[in-house]
Amino acid sequence: QVQLVESGGGLVQAGGSLRVSCVASGTFFNRFDMGWYRQAPGKQRELVATITRSGRSNYADSVKGRFTISRDNAKNTVYLQMNTLKPEDTAVYYCNAQWEIGASSYDYWGQGTQVTVSS
């Protein structure tokens, strides 16, 4: 069982920056592909960015060039640096961990952290 705890959300003005973090419990963090997703009120949860266990990253078109995902395996932590924030980035941001091994798959979610961008 893996527990994910997000932190770092808050209120920021448009154009500002924020970094959210996600700390994972357990000893197999480096085997997980990690991701950040977000869900705005009345909308479906959407992918923001992912980073594989080998460090390859992928971004939603809406955040490319503004957000950066990174991981520190020694700290069991994945980060999302968000720059040039826009009001439409307002959402609850969720951390996700996925691991497929053989016929088994593991999928864990954090409780979310609120990011609010004021105009």
Image (tube, helix red, strand yellow):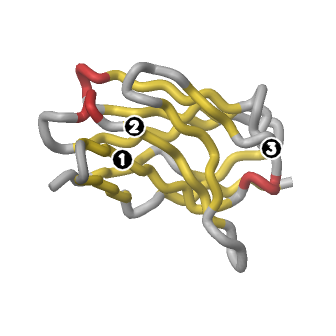
70 displayed left or right of 28 = right
Local secondary structure at mark 3: loop
Residue at position x 33%, y 56% in the image: 107
Tell me the residue that label 1 is attached to: 98
Question: With respect to residue 96, does 78 lie above or below?
Answer: above
Q: Position of residue 16 (x, y in %)?
A: 75, 36
- Which mark is on residue 62? 3
Local secondary structure at mark 1: strand
Using the image as rendered, state which of residue 63 and residue 99 is in the foreground.
Answer: 99
Q: Label 2, label 1: how many angstroms apart (C-alpha)?
A: 5 Å
Using the image as rendered, state which of residue 62 and residue 58 is in the foreground.
Answer: 58
Of tags 3 and 1, which is closer to the observer? Answer: 1
Of tags 3 and 2, which is closer to the observer? Answer: 2
Tell me the residue that label 2 is attached to: 33
Q: Position of residue 86 (x, y in %)?
A: 82, 47
Q: Earlier in the sequence, mark 2 or mark 1?
A: 2
Q: Label 3, label 1: how many angstroms apart (C-alpha)?
A: 23 Å
Cβ atoms under marks 2 and 1 closer than 8 Å = yes
Image quarter of the N terminus: bottom left
Q: Name the kind of residue labelled 1 in the image.
A: Gln
Image quarter of the C terminus: bottom right
46 displayed left or right of 25 = right
38 displayed left or right of 54 = right
Residue at position x 71%, y 73% in the image: 43
Local secondary structure at mark 2: strand
Image quadrant assignment for residue 46: bottom right
